[in-house]
Image: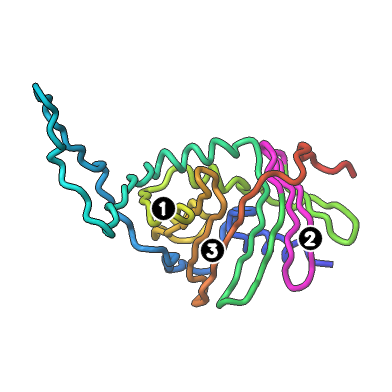
Amino acid sequence: MLPAASAALALCLVVSLAAGCSIEESSPSTTPVPAPPTVFVTASGPAIDSVPPTTGVPSESSTPAVPAGTEAPPITNPPPDPLALLTAAFDAIAGGYHFATVATVNDVVAVTADGDRVGEGTRVNVTTGGSTVSYAITLEGTWVLADGSWSELDQPAPAVDPVGALRSPTSIVVSSYGAGPTVLTGTYPASVLSLAGDGPVEVALEFDGTTLRSITYASTQNGALATVRADVSPLVDATPVTLPVV
């Protein structure tokens, strides 16, 4: 059986993407998530030559032809508005979503979490050290299922909605867009991610079109590099989250 204290720590290690409680052993410095360089694109489209009307017999167009074998320059679309994309994507999953989170420490998997956020509640299975513990989290409290029995944790329910926490970045830019996924890089206070300290943390948010697909960030905890990635997808279990009756 995983003790309640260890269970709470396991939930904490998911670092707000599954449960959002604070780790305050030391004030960490943060390591930005590597992201492609910011793309700056001129928003003006291709120029269109205007040919004035003529009288009499039409003459051949004076617009120079593209030499044979030469490709016309590509039309470059402007980048999306990052804040508008972020807001629209979060609004689309406000009613619920599935998340699969992996937290690594020095490139070694420390915690995994797989669950559903439904309305104001979350059900999630957290695995650490080979043991899996199930949680039911609502505004009323947090319950843990271990060895076949439920027990209530004697601490306030943590923040469990990473979408709500990431709606208001300090700044956000388009890091990559075009043929592949669109990647936004947002800067947030460490406290938004339930990390100790006040330093900024860079979060990479990946989109498929306007659909949020993943959230990734890194920080240094007690001298060790910790990386958290949450993949977001449609709900697996859309039934409301209720606290167990014992």
Q: Label 1: how many residues lie within 10 Å, few (<14), some (14-19) or many (20+)?
A: few
Observer-nearest of 113 and 30: 113
Can residue 188 be seen by looking at this rendering? Answer: no
26 above or below 169?
below
Residue type indicated by callout 2 = Val
Q: Which residue is mark 3?
A: 24
Q: CA distance from mark 2 to mark 3?
A: 23 Å
Image quadrant in which the N terminus is located: bottom right
Stretch in magenta:
116-140
Res 51 quadrant in image: top left
- Sequence order check, earlier mark of 2 and 1: 2
Residue type indicated by callout 1 = Gly
Would residue 39 appear left or right of 232 to someone viewing this image?
Answer: left
Residue drawn 60% across and 71% down? 104
Observer-nearest of 74 and 61: 61
Image quadrant in which the C terminus is located: top right
In the picture as drawn, the residue positioned furthest to the front comes out as: 57
Q: Position of residue 143 (x, y in %)?
A: 78, 49
